[in-house]
Amino acid sequence: MSDPRDRDRGHPYERVAAVIRDRIASGAWPPGYRLPSRHALAHELLDGAGGENVVRRAQEMLIEEGVLEARKGSGTYVRAPRSRYVLRAPLCGLLPDGFNGRWETHSTPRIAAPDPIADRLGIETGALCVRTEYTVHAAGEGPLLAVTSWEPMELTGSSPVVLPGHGPLADSTVAERMAQADVRVIAVKETLTPVVLDRVQAPRVSAPVGSMAIVIARTHVADDGRVVETADLLVPALHWELAYQHQLASGRRGIGGEPWAVGDEPR
């Protein structure tokens, strides 16, 4: 068993955290186990002297990482492993297929497109857009997935579907809403980037600061080549697995020949 007094690197709270992780990994402290008091841990691991604050900092760090959980008025416990959900990409609707949860949305119209968003949409910087923030919740849990979406107002600004979360097609996909503005969406493109969650991002998806996530930069493309929506999906690894399925070409097409056109599925 590791002992922080035998380690000469890192801050004292990091050494205490390492001991706690070791005990959890070994099974000595199983899920649901109530940790000894800070006083007891300080006496055991740090010979007492001023050690309770060190233990507190170690526990706070492990709570942020999702290893421990604090229960008000009860103590600190080893957190049970949580179920992870499957996100089948591309996510074109508001909820992942088969996900038993709900979504919340807030749209703000007439937002000037900043440079990066304007580049992605192929519009001028400062052109007016609708920005929509989505959060996805599982039953009885906080937000597990966050989406920030941008749409040019020139496409839907005069239509009843200008605000994605409101109006006659509030529960519809981007493609279904755009069809009401006579825009035919034919493709979804995605770029995946791994990130470490910071103190702004982590609360948005109920994940610890410093844990891993994937940002999916998504664009919906119309049949005339215009990008009609772009969004960043913040997908924490703590809660989700990403699953992709690609349709392969049959022997009579696409192998050694022309690439598949959008919408050209095998029959």
Image (cartoon, rainbow, N blue to C red):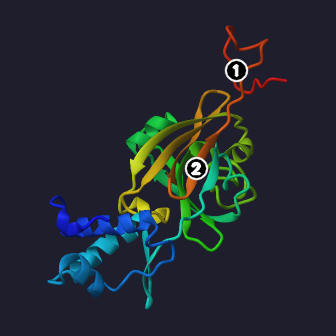
As shown in the figure, which amino acid type bears the numbered disc 2?
Answer: Glu
In this view, the residue farthest toward the front is 1
Q: Which mark is residue 241?
A: 2
Element under disc 2: strand
Q: Is residue 94 above or below residue 183?
A: below
Identify which residue is drawn at 76% across, 23% down: 264
Residue 152 in sight: yes
Q: Earlier in the sequence, mark 2 or mark 1?
A: 2
Element under disc 1: loop
Q: Is residue 4 above or below residue 174?
A: below
Q: Is residue 167 above or below residue 192?
A: below
Quarter of the figure with the C terminus:
top right
In the rendered image, which quarter is residue 227 located in? top right
In this view, the residue farthest toward the top is 256
Q: Label 1: which residue? A: 261
In depth, the one of 90 and 104 nearer the eye is 90
60 lies left or right of 235: left
Total marks in image: 2
In depth, the one of 261 and 199 nearer the eye is 199
Q: Position of residue 167 (x, y in %)?
A: 71, 60
Identify which residue is drawn at 55% across, 58% down: 239
As shown in the figure, which amino acid type bears the numbered disc 1?
Answer: Ala
